[in-house]
Image: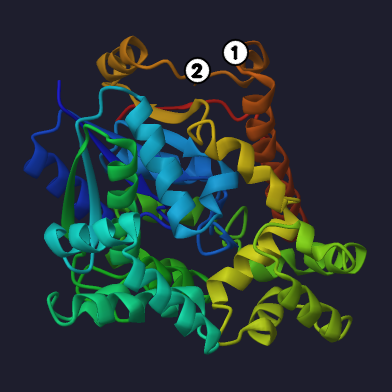
Amino acid sequence: MKICGLITEYNPFHNGHIHHMKEAREKTGADFLVVVMSGNYVQRGTPAIIDKYERTRMALNGGADLVLDLPVLFSTASAEVFAMAAVNLLNQLGCVEYLCFGSELGDIEPLNMIAEVLNNEPRSFSEDIRLLIRTGMSYPAARSMALENYFEGKIENLGAILESPNNILGIEYLRALKRLGSHMKPLTIRRWATEYHSYTTYADVASATALRNMLYEEDGLTRITPYVTPYTAREFALQYGVSTPVRANDFSQILQYRLEMEKDHLTDYYDFSQDLADRVNNLLPDVYIFKEWAQALKTKTYTRTRINRALLHLILNIREEDLKPYKDEDYCMYAKILGFNGNALPLLSEIKNNTALPIISKMADAKNMLTPLAMKLLMFDVDSTNIFRNVVYQKFGTLLKDEYTAGIIKYTE
């Protein structure tokens, strides 16, 4: 049995993801695809446009065999932590042979070379980063320039490679595989036609960014139709104005409340530096909307994504100290099933025979299966889902199911 792992957000699921799944199966000969997917909040520091159970249905219809939930503590973290947690989860399943990810480059060798340098950090490279940060550069920008200096033209178009989000994530996946000494074989597939943040559309391809922006408009349902599967289009039609579209600005009221209440303790929260906290306090109470906060706080030092994550961690009550214990415990301490294909029972059996991880299929059983530390990790998802549910209810008057009542999606065609 050949099993291939994918790390995804599907925010939303679209034709490019179908291409990724088909290519993954074809290039690896996989019998089954295991997807690790971000839940109700994504790595760019915003809520997902539609809840994780709806996105699970779309993924299963599109070709996934099993969808696992990436805990919110990791799905909203830096690229390095996001990748390490997701790769480690797949690795701990004990039977996933391949890791297949999309990248703008489509060539794994340059990504491998970069990953090797980042993992081992030659002295000249580390010193270069420190010097560049002192000039006022953000860490990502300093790291990119230091890499260009280190390779000195040995990797063609290195600057462009390091500016592309999926290349960056791909490098972090490779770093994680190397750190773990994982047996999983990496494979990258070139992103199909459009860039990650591109607003450009093609005959049947649009990025998730472009699709989200379409869905924010009144004619969004009609506009997305060429770029998503008929099933996804139907699901969005059923849920539009009922539970979607969800956007960062919908969390503005709770954000403002949290900023006011925690203004003296902001540095306790993950991704909040003292300088960022000071900037927030200088602006209070005049800024109110989530996106306005993100724009007002953006500087050369702080990227928009970093600021989004800091604000989101404040909303979700995720503190700096919360992540530390899990780095010592292989990050994901369980595998929580969001859904599976009706034909995937042999896959589930294979995983259970090869992993030491607790497999959560019923939330009611979790307390008896998990250690206190693992249960705390799960409760971050319970609490963050409740916040997502409350925002959806306030916006649409729809009460989504909570983590205990939602149940696993068992998809049959």
Q: Residue at x 35, y 33 (%)?
A: 90
Q: Which mark is residue 369?
A: 1
Give the amino acid at mark 1.
Met
| Observer able to see residue 235 | no
Task: Return the residue nearer the eye: 131 or 92.
Answer: 131
Question: Badge 1: few (under 14), some or many (20 or more) residues near its Cα, within 10 Å?
Answer: some
Q: Residue at x 68, y 82 (%)?
A: 297
The correct choice, above or below, for 177 with respect to 95 in the image is below
Q: Residue at x 34, y 71 (%)?
A: 125
Tell which circle, 2 or 1, labels the residue nearer the N-terminal end. Answer: 2
* Image position, residue 143 (x, y; %): 39, 74
Q: Quadrant of residue 6?
A: top left
**In the rendered view of the protein, which quadrant contains the N terminus?**
top left
* Image position, residue 171 (x, y; %): 29, 58
Labels 2 and 1 touching (C-beta < 8 A):
yes
Q: Residue at x 64, y 18 (%)?
A: 371
- Distance from the alpha carbon under mark 2 to that under mark 1: 6 Å
* Image position, residue 386 (x, y; %): 73, 43
The correct choice, above or below, for 276 with respect to 330 in the image is below
Question: Badge 2: few (under 14), some or many (20 or more) residues near its Cα, within 10 Å?
Answer: some
| Observer able to see residue 212 | yes
Give the amino acid at mark 2.
Pro
Task: Return the residue nearer the eye: 69 or 393.
Answer: 69
The correct choice, above or below, for 382 with respect to 113 in the image is above
Q: Secondary structure at mark 1?
A: helix
Task: Return the residue nearer the eye: 145 or 202.
Answer: 145
